[in-house]
Image (spheres, grey):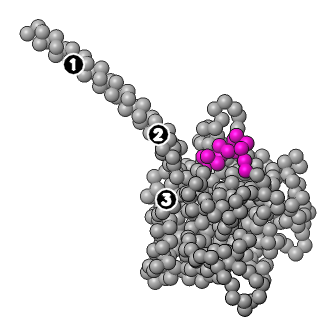
Amino acid sequence: MMVIKAAVAAAATFHSATSLRARSLLSEATADDKMSNADRGSIICAGLSCLDLQLVGCTQSGSDEAIERYDEAVHCAGGSASMTGTTLALLLRPSDDEEQHKEEVHILTKIGPDFAGNTLLEFYRRAGASTSLVLTDETARTSMAVLPVFKNGKRGCFVNLACNDGFTVDEVLGQVAQGVKSIASPTRAFLFGYPHLMPKMQGDSLRSMLQNARQKLSSGGSCVLLGVDLNGVDGSDPGAAREALIPALSEIDVLHLNEDEAMVLSSSSPSECTSGNDDDVTTNDVSPQLLSQIASFHAQGCAVVLLSLGSKGAFVSVTPDAQRLQQLSSASDPDSIAISQWTPGTQVRVPAFQIAHGEINANGAGDALFSGFCLAASSWSCIMERRLCESDEWKVTPQVAGAFASLVAWQRCDAKTRDGDGMRSAVQLMELIHRGNLPDVLEG
């Protein structure tokens, strides 16, 4: 009997110790899960979409009635929501050791129940993007576009906007509200594209949509970056083009546009040129009128302007208003979003990178630049800073964010990597910048 009691006591002691150890391991696992969940985030890519038919390798004789040739016809997911969403989804596909930091990319757009809409959904899923926020209108047609991609890498565009013409603010916010309920990880950024091609989301309507989207997505205490990408800015009516954008500038954290679009939006009499940090800026590629227009965007509340310069790269301008940047910091974690820590008034030019083998497809280059920049300007960069600066002080500055964006566009313009094969991940691109191991610069 004594032996049995001793055995029972020993077993009880072992069970107690094991239970304590199990609880300890469970606590550690729970803590690790919380850390992993804190590092997870989501990005919503919203706005115009269309199914593109690319005519790759087009000749361009210069005559309107000439019979031109092309090498192949290829469908792809086009428009801002499609291009930014698939680009980010491909970039953020985790490797085996990055699974715990998996990011979610959600595409929010409007399609019809047709071949083009179903094909878009398949492209989104294939890239790894979520389609849960895609709105299917049973009464609408999906937009389609034909894009001749010329042998020099440039392209044309012929489009029927279809259901994009009727896409409303209420529909967007309804899908955002659905996302708030269904998306587990906090939203890092809400990216919206091509308001000038979406008649029901311009001016005050655009401002209201962005304001309400920020409010809904920030309800959990996270700080959300709002980015707007321009396309289709009509040069025949500069006044209408300005009215479509200017009322919303105070809600835009990152505005992306190219030189031609900036000139259309500029006033007829340029005001005084902006004065950024002279040590940081190389403005020889940016005219005084463009600098003046960028200053006007800042004066009307836009935090950061990302100006595409084509083969010359891009120009980044940060508002001189420190309070505007502080609005993007979280009370619980002031360092939670990279853009809130940037030095007011900073202006930098970043180069474009060379594609050595020369097989170029520039379709979606601007969308890639925009999506890469917004990712780097968001709270995702804080994770990269912790990961890469174990032994040195390293921050994602406007120069770093611009270089990262340029690398994203570089991969997207490379015909061999644009669809994901051989594409470096977002983490790998940031590591290239951290090590200073960048491709050769393209001489514009």
Which circle's residue, 2 or 1, is located before the other in the chain? 1
Q: Position of residue 200 (x, y in %)?
A: 61, 78
Q: For the residue marked with disc 2, what is the amino acid? A: Lys
Is residue 47 among the parts visible in the rendering?
no
Q: Does residue 243 belong to the magenta stretch?
A: no
Q: Position of residue 337 (x, y in %)?
A: 64, 47
The residue where tag 1 is placed is 12
Residue name at image x 77 percent, y 71 percent: 261
Q: For the residue marked with disc 1, what is the amino acid? A: Ala
Is residue 423 among the parts visible in the rendering?
yes
How far apart in space, not on screen, are marks 3 and 1 (Cα)? 50 Å
Residue name at image x 68 percent, y 65 percent: 360
Instruction: Name the residue furthest top.
Output: 2
How far apart in space, not on screen, are marks 3 and 2 (Cα)? 24 Å
Which circle's residue, 3 or 1, is located before the other in the chain? 1
Left or right: residue 219 compared with residue 304: left
Q: What is the span of residues highlighted in magenta in the rendered image? A: 426-439
The residue where tag 3 is placed is 128
Secondary structure found at label 2: helix
* Disc ID at residue 34: 2
Snapshot quadrant of residue 358? bottom right
